[in-house]
Image (cartoon, rainbow, N blue to C red):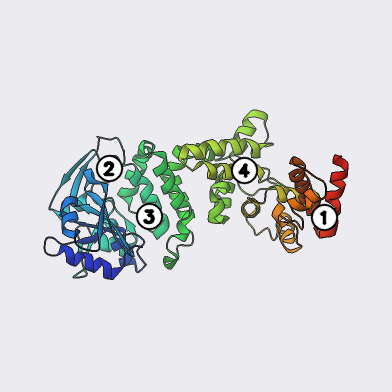
Amino acid sequence: MGADPAALRELASLFAPRAKLFAVGGFCRDRLLGVTPRDLDVCSELGVEEVKTLLSTSRFEVSGKCMRLGTARISAEGFSAEYTAFRTDSYPDGSGVHRPVGVTFTRDMRADALRRDFTCNAVYFDPLTEEYTDFFGGREDIKAKVLRAVREPDGVFGEDGLRVLRLVRFAAELGFSPEGATFLSAKRNAAKVLDITKERVFAELDKTFSADTAYPELGVTDGHVRGLRLMDDIGLIDLLIPELAALRGLEQPRKYHVYDAYRHSVEAYAAAPPSVRWAALMHDIGKKPACDRQGNMHGHDVIGAELAFARLTALGMPLRRAERTAELVRRHMIDLKGDMSEQKLRLFLLEHTGIADDLIALKRADAYATRGTDPGRLRIERVWSEMHSDGTPLAVKDLPVDGRDAEEAGLHGKEIGDALSALLRESAVNPVLRDRPRALAFLKRRAEKAD
C-alpha cells in the first residue's frame, strides 16, 4: 500500500469542490529525486471532521490517528496516506520534545510549511495539476543534495530534538549534506535528543544504520558510514553511545591491529551487513573498562556483552533483539586464533545455530577491521558450511530417529529428550550416527544404561 498515483488523483478530485489536496514532504522529495516514494503525506486546509464528511460516501476510509493535531489516516484498497490539516505548532520553550503542546489550524499553506523541518521536506505537489509549490527553495536544495532548515535553524532544532536525528538519517539515506548554519545548529542542539522517547531515538538510529539499503536507486552504498560519521561530527556518539566514544585513542597491540579501538569498531561496522551492524559497532566496548580494571583487554567480550545489552535497551532496542546482539558481542572471540578443535567448533555451532550466520558475518567484519584487508574464508565459516553440506543434523527434528523410536528402544519420559539431545551432539562429530540403524543402536544403548 502507498502512493498509487491514480488513487492519489482520485482522492484529490474528491477534495476539489471544497479545497485543494496536496502531497507534501517525502513524497515530493523522492519524486523530484526520481525514486519511488515510500510514504505518502497529504494535507489541505480542511479539518479532519470536514474530511470525514467529504469522503463519507467514497471508497476512502478516514480513521482517527491524532484528532487534536488534525491528523488522520486515509486508506482504501491498495492506498494509504497520512492526512494533516494545515496548522502551526508550538512547543515548550527549549524542551526539544517531539510532540507539540499547542496546535493552531490555518488556511495558510506557507504557515504550514514553516512548521516543517528542512526545505527538501517542505515542497507541496498538486496531484491534479502536477504542479509544485515551494516557498523556501526546496527544489533547488534537492537538486544540490543539501539539507537546510526551513527557517532559523536553532528554532527548528530547539523545538524538536528528533530533527537532529532526522538530519542524520536523511543525510545518510539520500546522500545529502547539511549546509553550514544547519549543521552548526544541529551540533549546538544535539543534547535535545535526550528529551525524545527512547523508542523514537532507536527508530531513527536503526534506519541510519541501514541507510545504504533505503534507496538503492540513488546508489548511496556508504549511507550507513555517512550517517555514523555525521553522528560523530555532531556529538551524538558521546551522548547516545558513550561506551563507544570511550574507545577513542585506546591503542591496541600493533602486532594484530592497525587502528585504535574506536576506529577498529567503526571499520567493523562499515564492513558488516545490516543485520549485525549494531553488534559490530559495539563488539569491543568492553575493552576500555577491561583495561581500567585489570590493565589489559582480557574478558572484554563478556564485559562488552553486559554493557551492550544495557545500552541497547536504554536506547529502545526491543528486548529480544538486544539479547541477541549482546550474545553476538559475547561470542565474537570464539576460535579467534583458529586453534579450537574442529569437534569443539562443531559443537559450539550446533549449540548456537540461531546466531551462527550472524556471528560469522560479525567475525568477518571484525577480521577485516583488524588489518583493513579481506580476511578470506574464516575457519568457522568453512566448518559451518561443511555442517550444512555433509548432512549434520542441526536440530532434533533432523535426526534419523524420533521420540517414538526412543520409546520403542525402552526410554521413557525425560530420558527420551535427553537421549535425542545426546544423539544430536554426537552426530555433529560422528558421521556414522547420522545413519538410522546406528542411531537406533545408540538409543538402545542409552536405554540399557538407564535400566
Across and down, in percent, residue 400 comes to: 77, 58
User: What is the residue that sits farthest to the top in this orientation?
Assistant: 293
Q: Which amino acid does label 2 sit on?
A: Asp
Residue under circle 2?
Answer: 154
- Residue at the image position 26 percent from the left and 66 percent from the top: 8
Residue type at the position of mark 3: Phe
Q: Which element carries disc 2, helix, strand or loop?
A: helix
Pointers 3 and 2 in contact (C-beta within 8 Å): no
Give the label, 3 or 1, closer to the camera. 1
Mark nearest the camera among 2 and 4 is 4
The Cα atoms of the two marked residues, 3 and 1, are separated by 57 Å
> Distance from label 4 to label 3 (Cα)?
31 Å
Contact (CB < 8 A) between labels 4 and 3? no
> Between 102 and 75, which is closer to the camera in this rendering?
75
Relative to 359, is 222 above or below? Answer: below
**Residue hosting label 3:** 170
Q: In the rendered image, which quarter is residue 232 located in?
A: top left
> Residue 326 falls in which quadrant of the image?
top right
Which residue is under mark 4?
Answer: 327
**Mark 2 in CB contact with mark 4 (< 8 angstroms):** no
Relative to residue 346, is residue 54 drawn left or right?
A: left
Do we see residue 67 in this rendering? Answer: yes
Upstream in the sequence, badge 1 or badge 4?
4
Residue closer to the observer: 333 or 87: 87
Q: Pointer 1: residues within 10 angstroms few (<14), some, or many (20+)?
A: many
Residue type at numbered disc 1: Ala
In this rendering, the label closer to the viewer, 4 or 3: 4
Between marks 1 and 4 in the image, the one whose residue lies nearer the viewer: 1
Viewport quadrant of the N terminus = bottom left
